[in-house]
Image (cartoon, coloured by chain):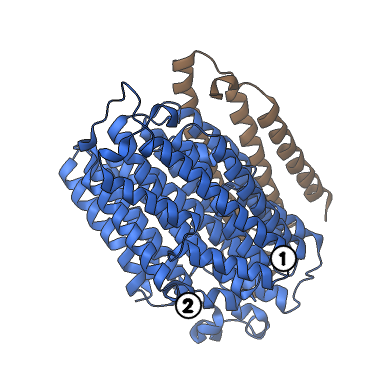
Chain colours: A brown, B blue
Amino acid sequence: MIPVQLASFFTAAALILIGIIGVFFIDNLIKKVIALSFISDGVNLFLVTLGYKPGGIVYIYMPGMSSSWFAQNASYPLPFALVLTSIVIGASTLAVMLAIIIILYHRHGSLSSKILED
Amino acid sequence: MKSLIALMVILPILCGLLLNLLHKKDRTIKILALTVAIILPIIPLIASYGAYYFGGYPPIAENPTIAEYLPAYITRSYLVKFHPAITYIFNSAQRIFIFILGIVAFLAIFTSLNEVKKPSGVYSFLMFMATAAVTAIVLADDIFNLYVFFEIAAISQAGIILSSNIKGSYKMALRYLFLGGVAAPMLLLGVALLLGAIGNVNISDMIFAMRNGLIDQGNPIFLTAAGLIIFGWLYGSGLPPFHTIKSGLYSKALPHAASLIQAFSVFTLVALGIIILRLFYYIPVVRWAIIIFSIAGMALGISMAIMQTDFKRLIGFLAVGELGYIGIGLGLGTTMSITAGLFQAVNEALVTACLFLGFGTILYQTGISEIDKLGGLLKYRPGVAGLMILAGFIMAGIPPFNVFQSKLMLIESAISAGFPELAIIMILLSIVTFMTFMKAYYSIYLKPEPRGLEVKAERIPSSTIFSMIILLVICTILGILPQLATSQFGSIIHGLL
């Protein structure tokens, strides 16, 4: 494992941990949503790091490339495809959460998570 | 007819999107939604068994034309058996799960369309989307595809709760999404770990790689991945520590929506549970974790149900408690216990749907959900009260109904697996479930009517009663002929054991 990959794994772990702490210990609802996006960004970074290949090329088969050279040099595309989907899903979930928070703010005049208690 | 496998997911999604576009065109919405809802349970009955490859990309071994163009180091390796495309697997077990899900979805959509003069296209869209997502979870042989639909199911369920317009529904939906915001990335992290260790996300390929020594099964990464996927499974199914939020979700949904959402929980529990067993059956701690969380779900669900004064919360906690029986069946890991667990899942989805619809009739009559403020409803609609007590008997496991058959199988399998303690716990909790239900039933139907209680019995829609009768008839048929369901699970169990 090369240093860049190792650093990325540590950054991903840090993002996930910061996110989990933020979700459970921060009172402000908007900040909770930001913490949630930290968690999903951490997981996405982990996936991207899995697919990283030192000196690898983009996995698009161009004219003139030999198939064996392409197979040896192209990055592994699957993690990137997964991350793309994950980002879209994450964005839509965050949008729904923010929309609910806006409505709750208009009703209660507060962004404290205490408004979620019955 | 294999294209029908994909249609089980694509049709409700397409219908949902059309309904969204047709918002405010009431008559068109009703006709389209009802037509597709009727088709939903029919498709699994006529679809052929097998695998469906999206994009038409089967494994290389099944496609000699492609193999001709590939180098020998690929065609002579295990790679030829790997699945290059998203794959759906449809067998007899999936047939019965999707059929039952389709029946519950049809009845929920039918009831919702008949309750209102102006149906909401958006609301129907959410019900169809969630149904499509859970169907995809049941069919998926690709763990990332499963994660995608897991998220879609969560957002759709939150949307259904938001649309219910019940007091506190926004807060409950946000809390559910917050917890989902933690649980779903954990599930994805588990998927990422498996991808890192095996290099693929297809479940069959992963199992193939594990069983043929292509990877080291003793790698601790697999245990970590199992833990993370189990965390996602607990969220999706509503087992502890998510039992409170799940029962809260049921209580903030309209009765027909609650009946559908609980079916989503049941089938998510089963589908993800089977995948966890397929991938990690060889790790004993995984099966123990499933059993422990299931027992906790049963104990916490039923004990919290006793304390409830609101019947919607009560039935929500009872539904969570019943989920534990399914988990125990899967966790014990024997042929009989898994059959019993899967049969319990089918029964649970049917009877709890009936109970949610039944409790909805009380809301139509009185608009009150606090048990203490109700009483004497038996004289207004004795037929509905009769259906309710029948549903309560079925849930508690009274013979000769279907839940009795599945719970008896579960108890026998626990004893034969060498865990008589589990059998005793299951019997005791069934008795407590029965007592809790009867206490609520007495307070609502038999106790003298409180002064000032305004009852409008004519408000109960006939569609609700029709749906309850259909569900109870299926429960009775499965009670008399349990082999109709139990004989269908062989394909899954053979693959597991």
Number of numbered discs visible in the structure rendering: 2
**Residue occupying the point 66% across, 56% down:** B425
Element on which disc 2 rests: loop
Q: Amino acid at mark 2?
A: Ser
How dense is the environment of label 2, judged by Cα within 10 Å: few (below 14), some, or many (20 and up)? few
Amino acid type assigned to the residue bearing label 1 in the image = Phe
Residue B116's place in the image compared with B491, above or below, is above
Q: Where's residue A82, x and y in %?
A: 58, 54
The answer, for residue B468, to whether it is visible in the render is yes
Quarter assignment of residue B42: bottom left
Q: Quadrant of the C terminus of chain B?
A: bottom right
Q: Residue at x 69, y 52 (%)?
A: B228
Residue B413 or residue A82, whichever sits in front: B413
Q: Nearer the viewer, residue B29 or A39?
A: B29
Task: Look at mark 1 in the image and give the residue it sits on.
Answer: B419
Distance between mark 2 and mark 1 Cα atoms: 25 Å
Q: Residues within 10 Å of mark 1 (few under 14, many from 20)?
A: some
Q: Residue furthest front?
A: B448
Q: In the visual, does B112 lie left or right of B424? A: left
Residue displayed at 18% across by 37% down:
B117
Residue holding disc 2? B487
Q: Quadrant of residue B473?
A: bottom left
Closer to the camera, B404 or B149? Answer: B404
Q: Secondary structure at mark 1?
A: loop
